[in-house]
């Protein structure tokens, strides 16, 4: 090694000098071991005054600070509020449609009238069920329809069903049994119309009138469309209430997302 290199070698490292050199910024630096050469960075450890500077551990940055939690919390609350507003807007949209449809009456000549079931008391129809049966009876007597479907199962403990109650009522009003189709099953609208769809197919009927209360109009047509039934609404004279409309709007809101068949599995 030349004299200029020797001149730069620190005298106290002569014994341990391994003959390795590192060049940087025009200077030569010497190390007396592989460890020194690997880990010692003179540029970082020697200050401007030429003295050795001890390592100072930098403070670790806190990942989760109070401000971070606040920011996350505000974002979460904003998302929740947006979701609530979206759900409320969706419900209001369906409420408007249900409310608008409850005044519809699309009565026209059809093959049959389907009376949706309602409560009965040991074979006596409730006020709501009787109003539906009377409306269907008028349709039959006026030759608007040729047949009347009476639908509905009974509640637990009932001696009879809504469908059989409707049969007895219409027989008592002079309707021939041959013109009455009894469907004593179904605890909700989808089940009753689904069972009716099979009879419509067997009898090769083209179209039917759906007889229920006005607030029910919108969902009944949706269900009929889902089942492939050509149907029109012909509501009874029972007035709709706000609670009925709200409940119906909730059913439509859910049914449009899940499908009315799936909705029927957890509603009566």
Image (spheres, grey):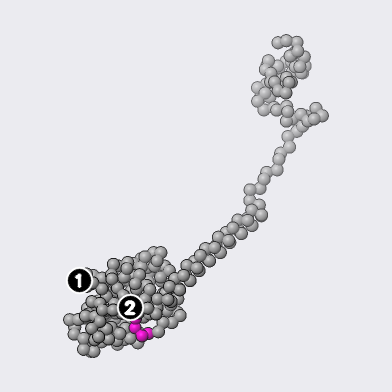
**Residue at position x 32%, y 68% in the image:** 225
Tell me where the magenta segment starts and ends, as one range.
234-238
Disc 2 element: loop
As for residue 62 lying within the magenta part, the answer is no
Q: Residue furthest top?
A: 2
Give the quadrant of the C terminus.
Answer: bottom left
**Residue at position x 50%, y 69% in the image:** 88
Disc 1 element: loop
Marks 1 and 2 sit apart, C-alpha to C-alpha, by 22 Å
Instruction: Classify mark 1: residues with Cα within 10 Å, few (<14), some (14-19) or many (20+).
Output: few
- Relative to 50, does residue 82 appear above or below in the rendering? below
Q: Is residue 221 left or right of residue 64?
A: left
Location of residue 262 (image quadrant): bottom left
Q: Residue furthest left?
A: 178
- Relative to 122, does residue 83 appear above or below in the rendering? above
Instruction: Classify mark 2: residues with Cα within 10 Å, few (<14), some (14-19) or many (20+).
Output: few
Location of residue 152 (image quadrant): bottom left
Residue picked out by circle 2: 106
- Relative to 220, does residue 119 appear above or below in the rendering? below
Q: Position of residue 44 (x, y in %)?
A: 73, 30
Mark 1 against mark 2, which lies toward the viewer?
2
Secondary structure mostly seen in magenta is loop
Residue picked out by circle 1: 204
Location of residue 48 (image quadrant): top right
Q: Position of residue 176 (x, y in %)?
A: 18, 85
Q: Position of residue 43 (x, y in %)?
A: 73, 28
Q: Position of residue 166 (x, y in %)?
A: 26, 83
């Amino acid at each position: 090694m030349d004299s200029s290199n020797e001149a730069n070698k620190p005298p106290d490292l002569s014994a341990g000098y391994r003959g390795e050199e590192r060049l940087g910024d025009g200077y030569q630096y010497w190390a007396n071991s592989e460890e020194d050469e690997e880990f010692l960075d003179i540029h970082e450890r020697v200050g401007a005054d030429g003295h050795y500077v001890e390592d100072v551990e930098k403070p670790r940055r806190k990942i989760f600070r109070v401000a971070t939690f606040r920011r996350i919390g505000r974002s979460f609350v904003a998302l929740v509020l947006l979701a609530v507003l979206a759900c409320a807007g969706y419900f209001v949209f369906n409420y408007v449609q249900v409310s608008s449809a409850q005044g519809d009456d699309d009565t026209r000549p059809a093959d049959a009238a389907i009376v949706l079931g309602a409560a009965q008391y040991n074979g006596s129809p409730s006020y709501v069920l009787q109003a539906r049966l009377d409306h269907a009876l008028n349709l039959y007597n006026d030759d608007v329809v040729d047949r009347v479907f009476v639908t509905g199962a009974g509640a637990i403990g009932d001696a009879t069903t809504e469908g059989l109650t409707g049969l007895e009522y219409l027989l008592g009003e002079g309707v021939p049994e041959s013109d009455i189709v009894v469907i004593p099953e179904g605890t909700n609208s989808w089940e009753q119309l689904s069972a009716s769809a099979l009879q419509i197919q067997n009898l090769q009927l083209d179209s039917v009138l759906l007889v229920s209360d006005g607030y029910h109009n919108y969902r009944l047509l949706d269900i009929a469309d889902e089942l492939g039934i050509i149907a029109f609404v012909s509501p009874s004279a029972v007035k709709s209430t706000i609670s009925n409309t709200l409940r119906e709007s909730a059913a439509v809101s859910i049914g449009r997302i899940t499908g009315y068949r799936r909705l029927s599995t957890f509603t009566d």
